Image: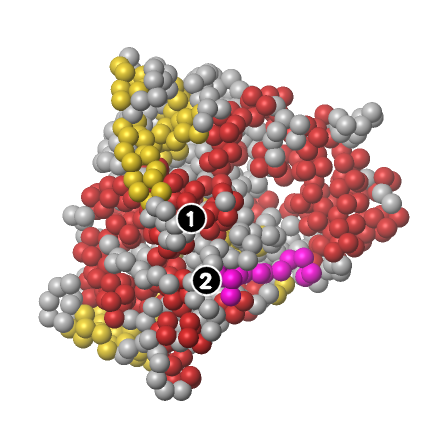
Amino acid sequence: MQSESLGVAVTLVCAALLVTAATVAGGFVSLAAPVSGEAWGPAYGANDGSLSDRLARAATGPTEVENPYGTATVRYDDHGVPHVTAENTEALYFAVGYVHARDRLFQMDLQRRLMAGNLSAAFGERTLDSDRFHRRMGFDDAAEASWAAVEGSDAAAGVRAYTAGVNRYIETGSLPLEFRLNDYRPTRWEPTDTLLVGKLISWGLTGDFRDLRGRVIERRLPEAESLYPRQLDHESSVLGRADLGDDGGSLGDPSGVGRPTTAAVSATGAGIAGSGDTDGHVGDAEGLYDSLRPYQRPPGVGSNSWVVGGEYTASGDPILANDPHLSLTVPPVWYEQHLVVTGEGSMDVRGVAFPGQPTVVIGQNREVSWGFTNVGADQTDLYSYVRPSEDTYLYRGEVREVERTTETIPVKGGEDAEVTIERTVHGPLIEREGGAVAVAWLGLAGTRELQAVHRLNRAGSIEAVDRAMRRFDSPTQNLVAIDGDGGTYFRLTGRYPVRTVEGERVRGDRVFNGSAGHGEWAGWEPYGPADWNGSGFVPYEAVPHAVDPGYVATANQRTADDPPFYIGSSSRYADPYRGERIYDRIERRVASDDPVTVDWTQDLQRDVRSAAAARFVPQILNATDELSPEARAAAERLAGWDRRMARDSEAALHFALFRERLRNATFHDEFHPAGLDPGYYPSLWTVGELPADSRWFDDVRTPGRETRADIVARTFERAVAAAEREGYETYADYNVVDLDHRFPVTALDYPEAPTDGSPYTVFNFRAGPGTQAGSSWRMVATTGERSVGVIPGGQSGVYYSPHYRSQLEAWRAGEYRPIPLEVAGRTTIVFEDGGGRA
């Protein structure tokens, strides 16, 4: 039941932004209604007229809606993008809420149900494990805390209006097919539901239990410590290769910040052993981590972004590129929109939003363009305690009661279930028989990123972007931005906790002694307010940033080689292959006589040359003496291969099958007997950097001593054999985009088709079973009229809509469409002034 529940919980929604896990075979729920005309038609309340008329009404909806905040107009363009124009901000966001619900209501409902621990009320007992976890974490209380933090701000009125718009559609519109198929109706939307969507995004990007992972490795395979370095040994950090110019860059002013102690930053590993502050009270760390890791941020989900200043471009104006690599879902993670306020508080902004939140998260207005990628910073700390009894814990010399409540989880078609919620001064207490930790995740307090993005949408300069980011508390992101005056900007957003042990700064990659009060974040309270400008967090000015860099590129690699404070360990960053490739091409371009253009930037986003292949192919060629004739012939074809992960390439196929097997061939013989599955393996980069005679290449199950050549040859043999066994001829047979709806209805799925790219190329795509990942939005932005973008599917989550998957083919082919700041399309919905307030 657990694997089914986790599949339900984590493959339906973005994130992923965000969170992924194994899918449930055949879909995630049993249909409550037959897949027939009766099930599909009435789902839209369309029972009269011809079938084509009913489908048209289902896809377009009413043309006139009363708006209590004022007038607004929605025009859908040829790509299904709504251009929403209104006389004021509240009238605008009411219309946006209505339109989001019209196009993505089922997706929105699933997101809030997941985070509130309320899936079982709609889908039955198979989602109980997920509901128990999310209830115990208390994300709904965290959303309440964030609403309290922004309720009196300039963003709150817009959220209230957005909420009213969603509810107007729920009350009067035709519900999506999925509700009918599963026989339930959505409840009213609340402002805190919008904040819950924000918590989903933040948790999927920063929430993890990797400090327990280190504890498990320490206990089960301590000799593996060297495989998890503080920093991967590469020279492609974000700021390490950026063109900061004479005045452009700053790592932040570390004055008053301090650095972790020498002992804490020693290069002896990733804080797995010798952390100095772990204690013996976690109990069964192995079992606890195994039960929790399906809910944490998955490895490998990443993004690309870069900016190039006007001194290097053909137009003399800067260019920005961004493509966040998130879970690829049906419907897509993002929803594109163009929002215009014509009256007081004027605004003109276009880009993509998360359904459930009104603002543009990545995009541009007439003065500023911006994008985000994930930092991979450590925003989660774990605490263990001395427990005098089951009901108490020791904290700073005082015995305290565990705060304990019981909640009932409604279960559709079964008996309701109870879950016990436990909390300490540090956060939720997560227990498994034999082990327990309290979880302090930054997003459990009152964060204000909703307000930050609200202001970002109206920013008119880099300076205004900087001011907005002061309230972007979570998640930690690499922000890049450009403005109409030629300005360029890079900044790490979010808050970075200061951990201390007996007055000394320490790293956060450990389980802290909660009874001693070690590692606490001063001024932070779970489910309450936080003093974001206090001593518990690194000052905003000290966080790495760069003003007017000539160019800077991010691909989830570490930010800086010597940051002024602890950000995270190597396991939280991406391997540097994508970042290395992006910087290589940008540096060659700016050193040439050819300027950077929008077309060249699109070509870089489509780049499929694998830096990983460039690293490992020579190792394969050096091992040809160990290969069979068939495998040797395949290896010889690699010699002339251009290292491009292109769909028509046989060499790309063999390399992909080799790459996905190499870590297992290297580490299985030591890790498996220690009870460590592939989720514990070191990174691919680490394998590539091992000496040829490393002990890890030796297969301890054989009498001889293997070297890298032996393991590489063995792995390539298996890759060639796998291609033969599966009937694969080229990479196109393996690298297939296969995006399925979570309901077991084939008609709702997107059609399968091959594509280019890999997890380690700039044109990013991760194939394989389960939820696939890749560029969830591909954008190249200027401050002029040449911005372009594309999403992996369609704008509408309504199956009958012509925009259910209308952009899928263009996305797979690496094509774009213009995204100008001009209102386009035919008037579809007119919102008339209702003369009051919702």
Instruction: Give me the disc on residue 610.
Output: none
Tell me what residue is drawn at x 70 percent, y 49 percent.
657
Overall secondary structure of the magenta section? loop
Identify the residue position indicated by label 2 in the image: 31
Q: Depth check: 557 or 13 in front? A: 13
Please say if 671 is above or below 729. Answer: above
**Residue 507 image position (x, y, % from top left):** 43, 25
Instruction: Give me the disc on residue 125.
Output: 1
Please tell me whether residue 740 belongs to the stretch shown in magenta: yes
Residue 338, image quadrant: bottom left
Please say if 568 is above or below 169. Answer: above
Colour scheme shown: secondary structure
Please say if 559 is above or below 776. Answer: above
Local packing at callout 1 (Cα closer than 10 Å; few below 14, some 14-19, many 20+) is many
Please tell me whether residue 394 belongs to the stretch shown in magenta: no
SS at badge 2 = loop
From the viewer's perspective, tell me whether residue 98 is left or right of residue 637.
Answer: left
Tell me what residue is drawn at x 46 percent, y 40 percent.
296
